[in-house]
Image (tube, rainbow, N blue to C red):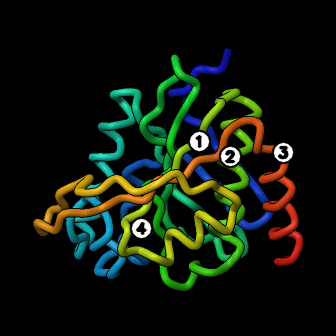
């Protein structure tokens, strides 16, 4: 049985997902510091390289606890860091996990990057880890994120009201989605078609 906490590298045609490390801080800060998407996330405003280092260290702390497996996303054509994503809320006993904490630099949004990231992460989750459920969630106010999740074929389950208090004090409602094992074959086919249209 595969150890869920073993760092892995996943490589496609457009991106490479490699284990997050402090070596990625500068590249992540270059494309992520000061962006407006942080207002939808639970980490506070990331404005500087030092803020990004703090964020990275927090992700690595979670990885040591065994709940998360964070990745830096490398854009293969340019060799640049494109963003970050991770497995989170991993529960091997229940064969479930969440894909989240995902963000990309502006120039990598609405490209093949997110589609291939999700394809690689879902393939490994369902076909190697043998999960039975993958969860996603998005801020109710973040319509772009919701559309991106729906586009890959995840099913909307509902909204948790007053789900989180964000660092700026805003009370966030979260929209939950999932893909279960019996749906994976169809979702995989959809993702492969989306990637083929980008070639």
SS at badge 4:
helix
The earlier-in-sequence mark between 3 and 1 is 1
In the figure, is residue 132 to the left or right of 44?
Answer: right
Q: Quadrant of residue 140?
A: bottom left
The earlier-in-sequence mark between 1 and 4 is 4
Count of numbered circles in the view: 4
Q: Residue at x 61, y 36 (%)?
A: 133
Q: Which residue is mark 4?
A: 28
Label 3, label 4: how many angstroms apart (C-alpha)?
A: 33 Å
**Of residues 78 and 85, the one drawn nearer to the viewer in this rendering:** 85
Whether residue 71 is visible here, answered yes or no, is no
- Contact? badges 3 and 4 (CB < 8 Å): no
SS at badge 2:
helix
Residue 69 is labelled as none
Q: Residue at x 57, y 79 (%)?
A: 109
**Of residues 162 and 86, the one drawn nearer to the viewer in this rendering:** 162
Q: Which residue is mark 3?
A: 185
- Contact? badges 1 and 2 (CB < 8 Å): yes
**Of residues 114 and 33, the one drawn nearer to the viewer in this rendering:** 114
Q: Local crowd at mark 4 within 10 Å, few (<14), some, or many (≥20)?
A: many
In the figure, is residue 95 to the left or right of 159?
Answer: right
Image coordinates of residue 165 in percent, x first then y, are 17, 57
């Amino acid at each position: 049985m595969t150890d869920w906490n073993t760092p892995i590298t996943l490589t496609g045609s457009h991106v490479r997902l490699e284990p997050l490390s402090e070596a990625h801080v500068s590249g992540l800060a270059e494309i992520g510091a000061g962006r407006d998407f942080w207002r939808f996330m639970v980490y506070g405003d990331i404005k500087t390289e030092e803020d990004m280092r703090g964020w990275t260290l927090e992700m690595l702390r979670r990885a040591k606890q065994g709940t998360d497996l964070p990745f830096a996303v490398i854009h293969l054509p340019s060799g640049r860091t494109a963003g970050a994503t991770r497995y989170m809320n991993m529960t091997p006993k229940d064969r479930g996990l969440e894909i989240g904490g995902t963000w990309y630099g502006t120039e990598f949004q609405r490209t093949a990057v997110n589609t291939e990231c999700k394809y690689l992460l879902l393939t490994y989750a369902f076909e190697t880890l043998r999960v039975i459920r993958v969860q996603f969630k998005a801020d109710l106010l973040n319509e772009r994120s919701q559309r991106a999740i729906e586009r890959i074929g995840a099913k909307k389950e509902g909204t948790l009201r007053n789900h989180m208090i964000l660092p700026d004090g805003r009370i966030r409602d979260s929209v939950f989605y999932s893909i279960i094992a019996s749906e994976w074959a169809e979702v995989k086919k959809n993702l492969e078609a989306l990637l083929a249209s980008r070639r």
